[in-house]
Amino acid sequence: MTPDERLIQISQDFDQWRLTRPHRNAETPPALRQAALSLLPEFPVPRVAKSLGISANSLYLWRKPAPQAKSKPKAKPATFVQLPAASSPAEPARSLSLQIAQDLQLTLHGELSAQYLAQLIAGLRP
């Protein structure tokens, strides 16, 4: 088969694919891509692109090797660390600083019980 006959045959293959592709933006099958690229030693990119009804940019992109998938290190599975139950109630906090808004900060000092903190937080909610 001469190069011109191959160009015509591959052009017909592209036309047939366009008639049967699932949707307009369907990716060009790898076999058709390879067929188009096989014409480049014989013809310039603009002629191949025009004959096949594709953009020259597609041919340039198809020429580039596919990027290698980088293997990501596997994350270590999270482990559950069981802490011993507290035998006595936690010591109350001695100070607390809350940043409520960008320019509003609340700082409390002294013994702050869990009940007091819960009431404070409940009062801050909208």
Image: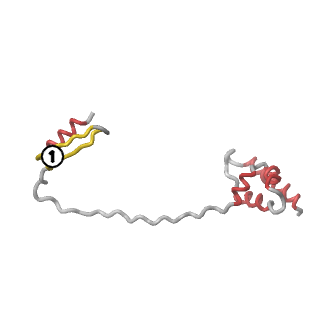
Callout 1: few (<14), some (14-19), or many (20+) C-alpha neighbours within 10 Å? few
Colour basis: secondary structure
Q: Which residue is mark 1?
A: 114
| Residue found 76% across the figure and 60% down from its top | 37
Tell me if 63 is positioned left or right of 108 in this view.
Answer: right
Work out which residue is located at the far front of the displayed protein and give it. Answer: 103
Q: Where residue 28 sits: x, y (%)?
A: 70, 53
Q: Residue at x 19, y 42 (%)?
A: 107
Q: Quadrant of the N terminus?
A: bottom right
Query: Can residue 15 be seen at all in this image of the molecule?
Result: no
49 or 9, which is in the foreground?
A: 49
Mark 1 falls on what kind of element?
helix
- Indicate the amino acid at tag 1: Ala
Count of number-bearing discs: 1
Q: Does any portion of residue 24 appear in the rendered image?
A: yes
Q: Residue 18: where, in percent of width, then height?
A: 75, 48
Residue 17, image x and y in percent? 75, 51
Q: Residue 77 location, x and y as percent?
A: 37, 64
| Residue beneath the point at 34% across and 62% down | 78
Query: Of residues 76 and 1, which is closer to you in this image?
Result: 76
Going by the image, does 119 lie left or right of 56? left
